[in-house]
Image (tube, helix red, strand yellow):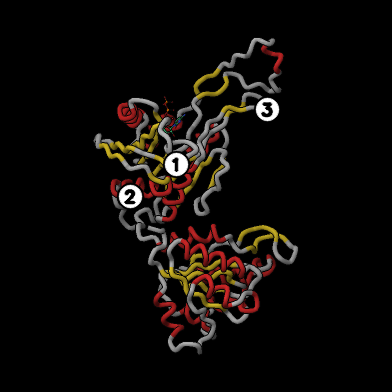
Amino acid sequence: MRPFDGRRVLLVVSGGIAAYKSAILTRRLIEAGAGVEVILTASAERFIGRVTFEGITGRPVHASLWDRPMAHLDLGLEADVVVVAPATANLISRLAVGAADDLATTAVLASRAPVIICPAMNTRMWEHPITQANVARLIDVGYGIAGPADGPLAEGESGPGRLLEPEEILPRIGRALETATGLRGRKVVATAGPTRTALDPVRFISNRSSGRMGFALAEAAWRRGGEVTLISGPSRVPRPAGPDVVEVETAGEMLAALETALTDADILLMAAAVGDFEPARAADSKIKKTSGAGKGFELALRAGPDLLLETRAFRERKGIFTLGFALETEDLLTRGREKLERKGMHLVAVNSAVEPGAGFESETNRITLIDRSGRVEELPLAKKTELADELLDRIEASIPAAAGR
Ligand code: CTP
């Protein structure tokens, strides 16, 4: 099943150079299974043609209140989510006063679906107090504001005003459409990726973790409504768009970031491959090849901090639900159980470091889950993104429902 199968998106495009990105967004939505209806404002039609969207959606584009009777009511009513991208300063101002003077504004006003506004405009227009007041009004009535991003603008200027990329807008639509919202209002901390420890100013010890499992967990928890802090070690894989990201390098930095983030956390998803060893002495200057005098070179290592052990007492005191991982080459279940007990986890996801298609550098993984009662559940080989949802389903089922959230 594709993530947006059967979901109906109403995409409102207003007139800005960034309108071309909306065509790509539409394509991505269709690929994800969504049905997309497009409304173009009069000025949008000057930037991008109807045929582009009609070609992508296979449906007529809507542009006028007078094309089809009641279209202004039906379009909003039938939508599961309304996305305005790009949203110009002008359209934002009209939405903020509840204008209903064209199909775009009328359809948004007549909809009960969640609305996501993706602003795109010149920086000075974005920063103008009137625009900011309009945006505040939209936030006030519950509209989601996605962006704008900071960067080069079409006029040769630079600053906040860029439309988010389709890859950044998509997860926000996913969050609005999500039906598993058991993490809404929960504070979730996820760790991901490897850590690095320096041997000297140019060399380091690290491991092959890609960060994918932790990123998938952070993104899925955010999509389910969680307030997510992702603490990530160095990785080339793009960070998920929704969570707040804290970038760290060493195990010590990860521990410090974790201690801060855990202060008010409800759930910890500990997927980072924290390095276990660090040099007994890190050299201040580059270690010379001649220092081994041609006989090789011995490196003295000592154990670094174990983040789960260091935070165990605090997590237990605060009742922070903890998912940990165990990467093993043999005796998977026995060692997984032992780690669960010793490191104070509620659930451990055991995976094999030697099985093809599982573990580090792979997009897929095979996981066996063990919980505190000793229950063992084997999950089939699956994409890390799918496993993230499987894991969160189980976590949602085992955390007590918080009153008033
Ligand atoms: N972990 C941690 N701090 C470390 C190492 C690991 O908090 N210094 C966490 C990992 O994020 C994971 C769990 O502990 O959730 C188990 O990690 P794993 O690498 O399997 O275990 P290790 O403690 O490193 O034990 P060993 O190397 O002996 O298997």
The residues bearing labels 2 and 3 have C-alpha atoms spaced at a distance of 44 Å
Q: In this view, does 202 lie to the left or right of 109?
A: right
Circles 2 and 3: CB distance less than 8 Å?
no
Q: Position of residue 178 (x, y in %)?
A: 39, 60
Q: Quadrant of the C terminus?
A: bottom left
Name the residue beneath numbered marker 1.
Answer: 262
The residues bearing labels 1 and 2 have C-alpha atoms spaced at a distance of 22 Å
Disc 1 residue crowd, few under 14, some 14–19, many 20+, Cα 10 Å: many
Name the residue beneath numbered marker 2.
Answer: 393
Query: Identity of the amino acid at label 1?
Result: Leu
Q: Counting residues from the N terminus, which is met first, the one under dot 2 or under dot 3?
A: 3
Q: Where is residue 147 in the image (x, y as percent from the top left)?
A: 57, 61
Name the residue beneath numbered marker 3.
Answer: 201
Q: Residue at x 28, y 39 (%)?
A: 377
Q: How many labels does the image show?
A: 3
Q: In which quarter of the image is residue 52?
A: bottom right
